[in-house]
Image (cartoon, rainbow, N blue to C red):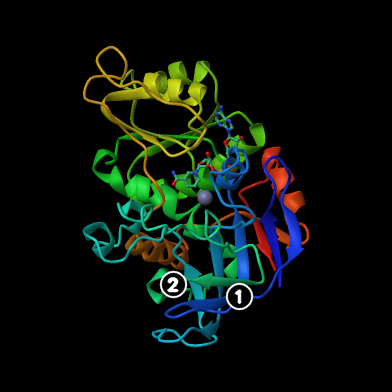
Amino acid sequence: MRAVQYRTVGSPPEVVEIPTPEPGPGQVRLRVTAAGLCHSDEFVMSLPEGVYELPLTLGHEGVGVVDALGPGAAGVSVGDAVAVYGAWGCGVCHACARGAENYCPHASSLGIQPPGLGAPGALAEYLIVDDVRHLVPLGDLDPVAAVSLTDAGLTPYHSIVSSLDALPAGSTAVVIGVGGLGHVGIQILRAITGATVIALDVDEEKQKLAREVGAHRALHSDESAVAAIRDLTGGVGAQVVFDFVGAPPTLEIARQAVAAGGRIEIVGIGGGTLATGFFSTPMGASVRAPYWGTRAELIEVLDLARAGAIHVETERFTLDEAPEAYRRLHEGAIRGRAVVVP
Ligand code: NAD
Ligand code: ZN
């Protein structure tokens, strides 16, 4: 089969021919119908030698059709359309029992890694899923439109749900970075909270996208944004700042724009850290760096899309065009999410 692999540190990903994998005991093989490209893949490809075993088949957003069941695998049938829950955990601990496999404390010591982030990923013709519990029925959702809900939808949803009590009517939420995650985050905020949404991006096209998907305001992301947010909130600041960039300048905006008692959600992996304490963050403010989402939340995100409350703006590529799609992602030239159809 053909797959998109990151093979050598410092080199771009390549389309290669590799053996089609056979599902082992309890495993399921999917024929991939769509796979999404995430900025985290860029992060993976920026890491030094030895962090991930190479070659690595990329792609942690995947949907497909059940193609073969390994010995003992049950609960799905060949031909079922499914979405992959990618934050694989051990499946038996307290976190996993709650569906929060994204916070499984045992995954790393057991060598369990998500597809595309250690295990072979979805940017291939076929994908092995380790357990039936990591599949969610896709139903009538279109694969290309739905695939990025598994991360670009699930990750902001998990972050927003965690801060839901801070976002009643009259509150303000700031979204920094209107890329794959941010543009879905804006829609989720509009769909499930009463907050006024202020979006920030350095790119005017992304500011335009923010307004199109429901942001009340979209501003340029620089030092002037803090004063504008203070102004729009009567001096109070934002109850929650969702930073989908996570770089030093955006964290500084978050620190200065958050209200007393507010929350800062650092979702982006942009290399920044935020010192928290007296005379750094406002009194009572909390700072959190959430990771991906729970299995239950993925079902909820798919339901939100099915209800027409959220959607993903997509740009479509073939498997052969995936390296080019990554180049465009690197340049910040993708509107919404790049989706590969093998
Ligand atoms: P993306 O490339 O699609 O979007 C990034 C957006 O940020 C672009 O619109 C870009 O113009 C904008 N941007 C860049 N610098 C900015 C600045 N200084 N101020 C405001 N906007 C700026 O990226 P994505 O796929 O949406 O991912 C966003 C981040 O979230 C990445 O760092 C990614 O690694 C991370 N991520 C984290 C998790 C998690 O579980 N925490 C999951 C998925 C992705
Ligand atoms: Zn991701």
Report the quarter where the C terminus lies.
Answer: bottom right
**Viewer-nearest residue: 51 or 275:** 51
Of callouts 1 and 2, which one flags the residue occurring earlier in the amino acid sequence?
A: 1
- Front: mark 1 or 2: 1
Q: Which residue is mark 2?
A: 135
Residue at screen point 49% across, 37% down: 269
Q: Is residue 213 visible?
A: no
Label 2 neighbour load within 10 Å: few <14, some 14-19, many 20+? many
Distance, label 1 to label 2, CA atoms, is 18 Å
Secondary structure of the residue carrying numbered label 1 = loop
Query: Residue 21 got which mark?
Result: 1
- The image shows residue 190 at horizontal and vertical percentages of 41, 47
Q: Is residue 316 visible?
A: yes
Report the quarter where the N terminus lies.
Answer: bottom right
Residue 209: quadrant of the picture: top right
Label 1 neighbour load within 10 Å: few <14, some 14-19, many 20+? few
**Viewer-nearest residue: 271 or 253:** 271
Residue 89: quadrant of the picture: bottom left
What amino acid type is highlighted by mark number 1? Pro
Whether 244 is drawn above or below 68: the answer is above
Residue at screen point 43% across, 55% down: 154
- The image shows residue 260 at horizontal and vertical percentages of 25, 23
Whether 57 is drawn above or below 163: the answer is below
- The image shows residue 156 at horizontal and vertical percentages of 42, 47
Label total for image: 2
Residue at screen point 57% across, 79% down: 22
Secondary structure of the residue carrying numbered label 2 = strand
- 156 relative position to 60: left or right: left
